[in-house]
Amino acid sequence: MTISLPVILAVSAVMFGLGVYGALTLNNAIRVLMCIELVLNSVNINLIAFSRYISPDPARGQVFSIFVMTVAAAEAAVGLAIILLIAKRRSHIDIERINLLKW
Amino acid sequence: MTVTDWVFLVAAAATLVGAWRVVMSQKIMHAALWLGFTFIGVAAIFLILGADFLAAAQILVYVGAITTIIIFGIMLSAVEDLRGPVEGSIWQRFFSQFATPRKGIFALLAGAGFAVLMMILYTQSSWPAAPGPEVLNTPRLIGEALFRRFVVPFEVASVILLVAFLGAIVLTTREEESK
């Protein structure tokens, strides 16, 4: 057996599902950020697998996943800065109790 | 099964176990360390798929920078609530699912439902059986693509990074000045 494309895609789909489940259920804001990183990583696996198996241009999927990494780094930096600010002001980061914008 | 298949199976299993532990660990520090483990597994999958430059970038950016930033974030905030076991154990969470559907059955549907749906989709469509020819010299190809065809998105991405880091610095220092 050689590694077939659906197996790789299934691994990435399971990882995506775990990330979505964690981001929806966890209470700690930093944990939610970690789960979003999982989701972005699984998308990267998909992009590279498609670029290896299907794309006529070998570098295209890899370039796309570099852009995904850039956005993930920016998101982690800004997200953690916001979370640290909230932790300073309210002395907790429980997203159920951060209800300033909840109506 | 060839050696590559075994390596892929081990890397995929490590990645999935790591992702499971990120979601299910009770302590946030354990989740952060398992996140780094997951990123290393993903880098191994990249290597098997022939994306050597991206595997190196994955180790540098995710394991080296993002995991460290998250651990710094946990360390820098002296909030006990942030470090302690805020999340319940797996069984506590499993039973509390029936109490609040928004955190339980709906989230389960969104996560597991998506994964199952995609797998059904994958098994029903036809895929090329073998990968394309081995791509050599990927850094050169990526560099040419970045600076020729994708030069505008590349510059936009660098501006996004600059703005994000400036924003992070401004957000965290403004608070201290106002005190």
Image: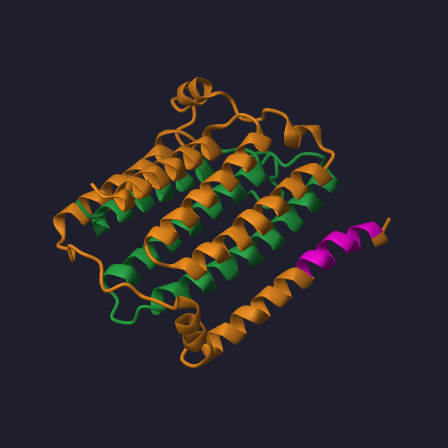
- Residue B169 in the magenta stretch? The answer is yes
Report whether A24 appears left or right of B70.
left
Identify the residue at image location x=50%, y=27%: B25
Q: Measured along the vertical axis of the image, is residue B85 above or below residue B121?
A: above
Q: Measured along the vertical axis of the image, is residue A21 above or below residue B124?
A: above
Task: Give residue B15's quadrant in the image.
Answer: top left
Q: Colour of chain A?
A: green
**Residue B105: percent from the left, percent from the top?**
35, 30
Q: Does any portion of residue B135 appear in the rendered image?
A: yes
The N terminus of chain B: image quadrant: top left
Identify the residue at image location x=48%, y=56%: B56
Q: Measured along the vertical axis of the image, is residue B148 above or below residue B160?
A: below
Q: Colour of chain B?
A: orange
Between B104 and A35, the one nearer to me in the picture: A35
Report whether B123 appears left or right of B93.
left
**Residue A18: percent from the left, percent from the top?**
39, 38
Report whether B108 appears left or right of B25.
left
Q: Which residues are magenta?
A: B167-176
Identify the residue at image location x=24%, y=60%: A53
Rendered image coloring scheme: by chain
Report whether B40 appears left or right of A88.
left
Q: Does any portion of residue B114 appear in the rendered image?
A: no
**Residue B158: percent from the left, percent from the top?**
56, 70
Between B73 and B86, the one nearer to me in the picture: B73
Identify the residue at image location x=73%, y=59%: B170
**Residue B168: percent from the left, percent from the top?**
67, 56
